[in-house]
Image (tube, rainbow, N blue to C red):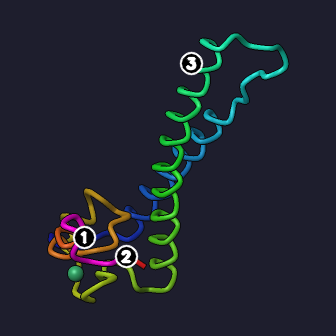
Amino acid sequence: MNKINLEEIKEKLIAERELLIEKLKGNDLSVDDSETPDPVDLAVRNYSKNVMLAVSENESRQLLLINEALERITDDEYGVCQNCEQDINPKRLNAVPWARYCLSCQELLEQGLLNED
Ligand SMILES: [Zn+2]
């Protein structure tokens, strides 16, 4: 068995998407800015705000990748590297169902040798 099970992949993607949406919602708890905070308090708040922003940036990005992967399933293009158009290793897809690239292209990307659109 060296094939991907699209139904299973789709389920994984949808489950992961739900999880991310829940997380992003959790980050949305707005900080109460109504009272005048002292400078230390303010610094702490800004710090945790920035951390939260960084977290949701990662998560929003992953959400985007998941949505793209689901679209590719619908368009019958799933499992093809978005750069070299080779089939992505099924093992890789089972581990990272939202992968855009095959392993070699992913490495290029991490080395800064591949420009993402
Ligand atoms: Zn590739």
Amino acid beneath label 1: Leu
Amino acid beneath label 2: Glu
Horizontal side of 22 relative to 33 (left or right) equals left
CA–CA distance between discs 2 and 3?
35 Å
Q: Say which quadrant the N terminus sits in.
A: bottom left
Instruction: Provide the residue designation for mark 3.
Output: 44
Amino acid beneath label 3: Val
Give the number of the mark in front: 2 or 3.
Answer: 3
Looking at the picture, does residue 21 appear above or below residue 81? Answer: above
Q: Say which quadrant the C terminus sits in.
A: bottom left
Instruction: State which quadrant residue 44 falls in.
Output: top right
Q: Earlier in the sequence, mark 1 or mark 2?
A: 1
Magenta-drawn segment: 110-116
Looking at the picture, does residue 71 appear above or below residue 14? Answer: below
Instruction: Provide the residue designation for mark 2.
Output: 116
Instruction: Provide the residue designation for mark 1.
Output: 109
Q: Position of residue 3 (x, y in %)?
A: 22, 74
Q: Earlier in the sequence, mark 2 or mark 3?
A: 3
Task: Decide: few, some or many residues near mark 3? Use Cα within 10 Å; few <14, some 14-19, many ≥20.
Answer: few
Q: Residue at x 30, y 82 (%)?
A: 80
Looking at the picture, does residue 42 appear above or below residue 81? Answer: above
Q: Ligand 1: give its quadrant.
A: bottom left
Give the number of the mark in front: 1 or 3.
Answer: 3
CA–CA distance between discs 1 and 3?
35 Å
31 in magenta: no
113 in magenta: yes
Task: Decide: few, some or many residues near mark 1? Use Cα within 10 Å; few <14, some 14-19, many ≥20.
Answer: some
Residue at the extreme front of the image, as rendered: 39
Closest to the observer, 28 or 32: 32
Q: Residue at x 51, y 80 (%)?
A: 74
